[in-house]
Image (cartoon, grey):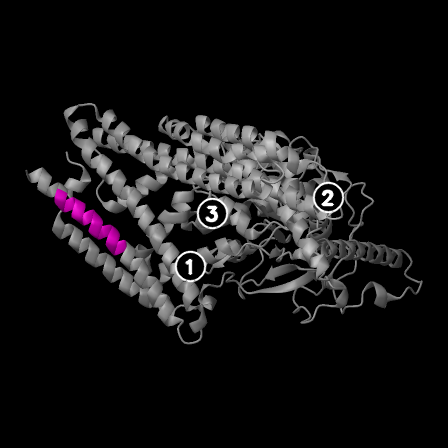
Amino acid sequence: METSSRNGMTEQLINTWTDIGSQMWKNWFDLVGMASQAPLQEQQAGLEAVSQRFFDQQQLLARLLRLSFHTWQESFPQVRTGENWQQFLQNYSQSIRSQLDEFSTGMLKANQDVGGLWQLYLQEIQKFNQLWGTSLLNSLHPLGQAVSTAKAEPLLELNSLYWNLLYEETSAGLLRSPLLGPTRELNGKVLRAFDAWTQLYRASVDYQIVLAEVQGHSFEALMRELVAKAEQGKTIKDWREFQQLWAGVADTVFEQSFCQEANLKVRGRFLNALNLYRLHQQELLEVWMGMMNLPLRSEVDELHKTVYELRKEVKSLKKQLAQLETQTPTRTVSSELTNPEPATAPATPNKGTSSPKGSKSSRARGNTSAPEEQPPETPPPDATPEA
Amino acid sequence: MLPFLLQIHLEESSHESAQLTHKLVKGMENLSQLREEDIEVGATPREVVYQEDKVKLYRFKSPVDQKKTANTPILMVYALVNRPFMVDLQEDRSLVANLLKLGLDIYLIDWGYPGRGDRWLTLDDYINGYLNNCVDFIRASHQLDKVNLLGICQGGTFSLCYSSLYPDKVNNLVVMVAPVDFHQPETLLNMRGGCTLGAEAIDVDLMVDALGNIPGDFLNLEFLMLKPQQLGIQKYLDVPDLMDSPEKLLNFLRMEKWIFDSPDQAGETYRQFMKDFYQGNKLIKNQVKIGDQQVNLLNLTMPILNLYAEKDHLVPPASSLALAKYIGTQDYTAKGFPVGHIGMYVSGKVQRDLPPVIADWLRKRD
């Protein structure tokens, strides 16, 4: 009876605690918003949006912690009496996974939407593409079951199956084939960008599956850690200690998981697909910029490269000139060319040259001032990138 | 024995809640009085003595009454990642200030913030160019053949390459938390960098082609993702505890500023560093090429002091300590400190113990 009333009380306490935390951050943002009110009125909306996002994240965190608390609360009496606490843990793990199941289903429904859109786009030229939506829908159930096994592999495999069967072997072939007509170049770029986007989407789903699995494992590890501590007589004293323990355990699981090559490969595929998509995106953007007669990114890069190479060459020539001057001091080589700035430090080191062992390469120097002097306020032209 | 939830008493919780609220109110007051300039890093007076493109060479000013205890100046070479002023974060947490107090002459390279126009800079430009020119400047200014190098983190790796290429310009080499052996399958940073999987973990060529320079924010995210809960959430949940102390709040905010003030990485430099060092682990195989020259660690015949952090999650001790196996010198010393990577700069205990270790070691070899 007493325990039950205490449970109720602690339940309320947790709720109060998390609500206070949420309210605290909300107030903090409101305060910041008020502080910057006058000159930054127009930024208020943005600030509120940021506050809201932060606020939402806090709530999400609070929900996870609440669930962790409840698990601990219910499994602890079993630990005390030596009963099968693992069963409780399993039940809660199952609960977490069913949430992940919902998440994955959501992702796949989004996939389905994408498939539907693509279907509309291509239905006139590729009727068999209708396989997409139906097959995706049919796969939702087995996918959900795979989630409940707590392993990422079946999910990854299933996701791979979708894309291989329903995209790679059907639409992708068409997407990658040579096109016809005066717009073939542009259409080719658009289709290749779309292809890259689908690859990114696939990789993203895989990566989310792995992250979800890691979260599930970290939850289990936290529960095991709590039980182990309790068995050693080390109870968690307060809410913050619990949070710290949770963060430490979760990060350890995260680290271990991503030190595994299989998971790293999934992350790598996501990252690489992201960069590949960006490249295609830029390619398309450049088409538009070209039409608008705007300078292209690739053109600016090319200019930068030319400037870089020229700057390097000038530095090298200056250095060679300075060396020649040192070797033939009686000759009147224009010193203004080699050392235009009012440098007070010796132009060359007191021993040898600055080339590496056996190296033919050389680098010219920038502007100098003696250690005790202030540097010139405006650097001489040859020391700036624009020179 | 009861779980802590059942041990919590209402009065204690109320008390804790009241305390926290009190701290928060005080903290808000403290925070509202602070401005960006209050959290500037880099406390010790310094002057720019040499500048080339965006790179600046600083010389720190010694205390007026400080007598020099060594002839050879030290050139600090910091990483391209983050700003170099971690070595001079604030007055009471400054490796630079502590070394100055011990009578050493300190120079520091600030690599600057590479812009899109610097995308083509290579390791050759950084090491054979900027670093070498800074060394030459100091040698010329002091009429010395050699300088002492103190390379930190990635700057330590640069210093190793430089000292191997120019051994006649380096009197003593000190490396601090410097990665040497990049094949570290137990370390998440190395694994994410592709030390075992190469391009399957991250296709660096593709990334540089797509992004040009690598954004500092991407690197920040990578570092945060090494401990996502602790660095992304827990750290901020602990803030209310320190907000009521202006000094602690300042320390925290300064560190935040330093962490997130991340320059972009010049694309070509990043490409070579990641592929040759992280993925190819070529440094210890003597296969790294800087410009047209091959780095051979056996050329490291000068005295070497290797300082490492025993709890380092970015550069594990094993990575730094591997250096002993590949160098040519007989005068090699390694010393560990019981802290993490950042602790090497900010821990009070390390700041008390580390500077004398460096100063004594250098003086004996001056």
Q: Nearer the viewer, mark 1 or mark 3?
A: 1
Q: Quadrant of residue A88?
A: top left
Q: Are marks 2 and 3 on the same chain?
A: yes
Quarter of the figure with the N terminus of chain A: top left
> Can residue B172 be seen here?
no
Q: Kindly state the secondary structure of the residue where label 2 is placed.
A: loop
User: Local crowd at mark 3 within 10 Å, few (<14), some, or many (≥20)?
Assistant: some
> Can residue A382 be seen here?
yes
Nearer the N terminus, badge 2 or badge 3?
2
Residue drawn at 21 percent across, 28 percent down? A231
Q: Main secondary structure of the magenta part?
A: helix
Range covered by the magenta-colored residues: A8-21
| x, y percent for residue B300 | 67, 37
**Residue linked to disc 1:** B253
Nearer the N terminus, badge 1 or badge 3?
1
Cα distance between the residues tagged 1 and 3? 15 Å
**Residue linked to disc 2:** B166
- Which amino acid lies under the numbered mark 1 shown in the image of this protein? Leu
Quarter of the figure with the C terminus of chain A: bottom right
| x, y percent for residue A104 | 41, 36
Q: Are marks 1 and 2 on the same chain?
A: yes
Residue in the foreground of this view, choosing between A124 and B114? A124
Q: Kindly state the secondary structure of the residue where label 1 is placed.
A: helix
